[in-house]
Image (tube, rainbow, N blue to C red):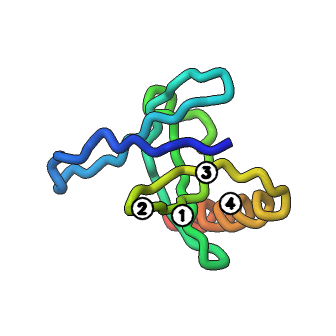
Amino acid sequence: MSEHVHDENCNHDHDHEEHVFLVSDEEGNEREMVMVFTFESEEQVYSVLLDRNDPEADGVIFRIEEEDGEAFLVGIEDDAEWERVTAIYEEIAKRENEGL
């Protein structure tokens, strides 16, 4: 499951920067997703996206890969990798919530 990143905000005001991507699910339905957080693990970059129209829904974590200068969001299919990155994100989120 590999999704191509479509950055909708190439010419936006950098003072109010919001990275919005169109992400297609398995059924081909597109959703506007907002990148809310990125982090690194084992020399890979990961991104957490929230549904722009349903910000209360759980976030989705994707691996970010680059090819020929374009960024791609790639679904994480390896169970060990998924467990590692979700544990990292949960720890980060826990620290963020304690800081409020």
The Cα–Cα distance between marks 3 and 2, rounded to whole angstroms, is 15 Å
Of the residues shown, which amino acid type is indicated by label 3?
A: Val
Q: Name the residue under label 3.
A: 74
Q: What element carries label 1?
A: helix
Mark nearest the camera among 1 and 3 is 3
The CA span between labels 2 and 1 is 35 Å
**Residue 90 figure quarter:** bottom right
Foreground mark, 1 or 4, reads 4
Q: Which mark is residue 90?
A: 4
Image label count: 4
- Observer-nearest of 47 and 23: 23
Question: In the rendering, at what x and y percent does residue 41 appear?
Answer: 64, 74
SS at mark 4?
A: helix
Residue lying at 68% horizontally and 42% vertically, measured from the top left? 1
Residue 68 is labelled as 2
Most distant residue in the right direction = 79
Tell whether 14 sits left or right of 67.
left
Q: How far apart are marks 1 and 3 (CA)?
A: 25 Å
Q: Name the residue under label 1.
A: 96
Badge nearest the viewer, 4 or 3: 3
Judged from the image, the secondary structure of the residue bearing numbered disc 2 is loop
Q: Is mark 3 on a helix, strand or loop?
A: strand
